[in-house]
Amino acid sequence: MTDYGTKYDRLYVAIVTPFKDGTYDPDEEQLRSFLRFFLQPEYVEAGIGIIINPEAGEIFYLSREEARKNVEIAIEEVQGKVPVFAGAIAPSTADTVKIAIDAKEAGADGIFIIPPMGAIDVTTAWDAVKYPEVWLDLLKAVQEGVGDMPFICHPTCNPHIRWGEGLPVEVAVQTCKEIDNVVGWKMTYNYTGFRIVSRALRQLDRHVGILGAPAVNFHENLASDCFDGTVSGSWNYTPEPMLAHILAWRRNDLTEARRIWDSGLAQIQEYVYSEFSRLHIRYKTATWLRGFISNPFMRPPMPKPRKEEVQILQERLSNTGLSVIEQEKIREVTDSLPR
């Protein structure tokens, strides 16, 4: 058993995959440029980390070759300055293991483990408490393939009023006890679920990082002192105020933390997270509006953003004091979008 301690407690960016204009082909140069943004000294010194090929990066719709190429690009750009974890998921367990091994061979520091995709039996109708093996067997297969590489878990599940989108506490605890590789738990929970699961993780006999996910709850999560880092797609479009907000909390400067949170940051996150069926579309659209990528489109069957979403995101980003692309560039895209 390898005890990683707090080594992988980081502010992980669940980075989007940019596509070339007019196609759905990954754009290598845009990805490299975007990765470099997070390698600026202020982010590296604050403890940033990279999740390449997360759900926000459309891992579900990338080919095995595309996923591996993204990992290779991230490793080349990062050059060991920050940890890089790579998402691994495919329709079958065997193919998921192959993607994880690809990531290991490409130089990733760890694997970002996503629950099974596919039939209703293992997705929307899955009872995780009664049938935890659906998740645990997948992790054990990946573990066998990559050895003692560290895992960060993306424990999404069918929604529950107590947990939100995250795996129930019983399964979280069981996973961390049975899978030694787990070093971080992405907190894909509502506020109540976060509190219950974080308390349970703190009671384990080893450290598993509590990594905040829905940025809409970060102010409250930071106040609870159960916040070892993040795994969030919100870093793609609001990196500057998010970092300033977290650093204010680290300094125990509550006045400044409140000021940043109430100066537009809360409002943009409230909108982005208000509909989970639009979450990743809004991530990518807001990232485009910031000028970090050249278009907001995700690979079908993911739908296009709507004009109303673009308008609201533009307004809320601007209200946060963040720059957005020129109106003419926005119109070039929105003219063809549904209302």
Image (spheres, grey):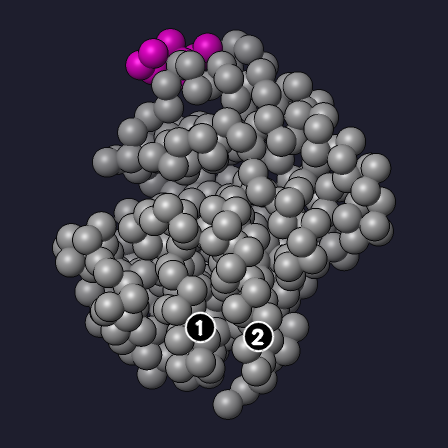
Q: Is residue 149 visible?
A: yes
Closer to us: 55 or 173: 173
Q: Which residue occupies 52% across, 9% down?
A: 328
Circle 1: is it few (<14), some (14-19), or many (20+) Cα within 10 Å? some
Drawn side of residue 220 relative to residue 194, left or right:
right
Query: Residue 203 bears which disc, if any?
Result: 2
Above or below for 104 versus 245: below
Task: Assign the C terminus to one quadrant of the image.
Answer: top left
What residue is disc 1 on? 173
Rendered location of residue 152, percent (x, y): 48, 66
Stretch in magenta: 331-339
Which is more toward the observer, 30 or 230?
230
- Left/right placement of residue 230 relative to residue 95 reads right
Q: Position of residue 215 (x, y in %)?
A: 57, 42
Q: Position of residue 65 (x, y in %)?
A: 31, 58
- 22 in the magenta segment: no
Tell me if label 2 and label 1 are in contact, CB under 8 Å: no
Instruction: Identify which residue, 81 or 32, lies in the foreground.
Output: 81
